[in-house]
Amino acid sequence: MERVPVLKIGTTLFVSIQIDLQDESVVRLQEDLADELSATGARGVIIDITAVEIVDSFIGRMLATIGSISRLFDAETVLVGMRPAVAITLTELGLSLRGVRTALNAEKGLALLNGSA
Amino acid sequence: MDVDNTQVRMTAYMRDHQDKVVGRWSELVAVGLRGRSSAAELRHELDDLYTLLLRAMSGADEQAVGELRATLAEMSRSRARNGFTPTQTALGVFALKDALYELIADAAELVPEYLAFSRMIDDLGLHTFETYAAAREQIIADQADAMLELSTPVMKLWEGVIAVPLVGTLDSARTQLVMEKLLETLVATGAEHAVLDITGVPTVDTEVAQHLLKTVSAARLLGTDCIVSGIRPQVAQTIVSLGIEFGDIATKATLADALAYALERGGQHIEKRNSGLPQQGPA
C-alpha cells in the first residue's frame, strides 16, 4: 500500500496527494495526520489534491472527516488545488465538504491559514 | 423492353422540345417563388437540371442518376437555408410535370409515357423534400448549439472577480456547461470571487435554484466565493414563496452591488474623489 507523507512546515502540516487514492491509503493518511497533529500541535493542515483526478463518495467523506478531526486539535484544514471535474463530481454526490475550507492553490491556502491565525 | 421503349420515346420528345419545356417550367417555378430568384438565374439552374434529367432518362449514363439526385439535394438545401417554404422547394420539381403536360396534351399517343415519367418526377420530388427537411433540422441543431455557446460567457470584472451573466432558462444541460466553464476560468485566472448574475433568467423555480446552488457549491470547493446578483422583485417573491433557501450565499440586487461587495471582501476600498477632476480646465 502506498503512503501519503505528512510534512511539517512551521505550524502547518502539508499533505500532497500524488497517487491514485485507494480507500486504505486515505484511512492510513487520516491516522498519520491525527498522530502528527497531536504530536506537533500544528494549527493548520493543507491538503493538496492537484494531482487527484478521480474521487468517490468514500474519499469525499474521508476528506470531510479529516477536517473534523483537525478541528478537534484546533487546527484548520484547507483543501487546495481541486480540479473542476472533481468539484463537479463531489457536488453531484451531494458532498459540499462544509467543515473544510478550500483554496485554488497551495499559495492561497497558506495565505488563508495565516490570515485567519 | 416496353418500358425502355416508352422511356426512349419520351426522352426523344423531351430533348426535341427542351427550349419550350424549360421555358414554361421556369415560368411556373418563378410564379411560385414570387420573384425571390431572378428569371435568368432560374432558367440557367433548371436548364442544367433538365439536361441532367435527360441524361439520367436515356439510361446510357450510369452516373447521371446519382448526379441528378445530388444536384437536387444541393438545390433544396440552399432553398432551406435561404428560408424558402417546403411548397416552393417541392414545386421546383413538380412544376416540370405541369409544363410538360401542357405540351403533351396535343400528342395523345405519349400519355402512357407521360405516366411513367410522372412517377419518376414524384420520386425525385420526394427526394427533394426529404433533403429539405434534413437541411432544416440541421439548421435547427446548429442554432441550438450556437445559442448554448452564446448564452454562457464568463468574464473578468476586476482582478480576482469574474462574472457569469446567465441568460435564459437554466436547465441541466445549461447548468453543466456554465459550471464547467466557470470552474475552468476559476482555475485559469485564480479568481477568489465569482458573481452569478441572473438578471436574464426569466423565472426561478425550485429546479433552477437547485442548479444555482450546485454551481455555487462546486465553485466553493475550488475555494471561490459566489455571489448571486440580479434578483428582480418578482423573482425574490417567488423564491420566498417557494421556500427556497440560499443559505449563506451572498445575494445582491444588482451586478454593481455584487462587485462592490466582492471588492470589499477582497480587501479593496472604493472611494469617491471629492476634488474636481484635473481636466476641468483652466478658468
Image (tube, coloured by chain):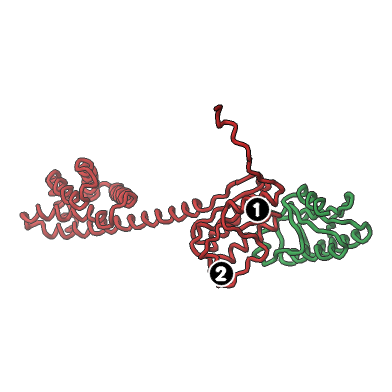
Chain colours: A green, B red
Q: Chain of mark 1?
A: B
Q: Earlier in the sequence, mark 2 or mark 1?
A: 2
**Which residue corresponds to mark 1?**
B261
Residue ranking furthest to the right: A39
Numbered disc 1: secondary structure: helix
Numbered disc 2: secondary structure: helix
Seen at 28% across and 59% down, the residue is B126
Circle on res. B41: none
Closer to us: B148 or B273: B273
Q: Is residue B265 at least partly visible in the picture?
A: yes
For the residues carrying marks 2 and 1, which lies nearer the camera in this image? 1
Q: Badge 2: few (under 14), some or many (20 or more) residues near its Cα, within 10 Å?
A: some
Height in image: B30 above or below B203? above
Using residue B268 as the reference point, say whether residue B7 is left or right of it. left
Picture quadrant of residue A100: bottom right
Closer to us: B182 or B229: B229
Seen at 18% across and 59% down, the residue is B116
Rendered-image quadrant of the C terminus of chain B: top right
Circle on res. B206: 2
Q: Badge 1: few (under 14), some or many (20 or more) residues near its Cα, within 10 Å?
A: some
Residue ranking furthest to the front: B283
**What amino acid type is highlighted by mark number 1?**
Tyr
Residue B247, percent from left and from top: 66, 66
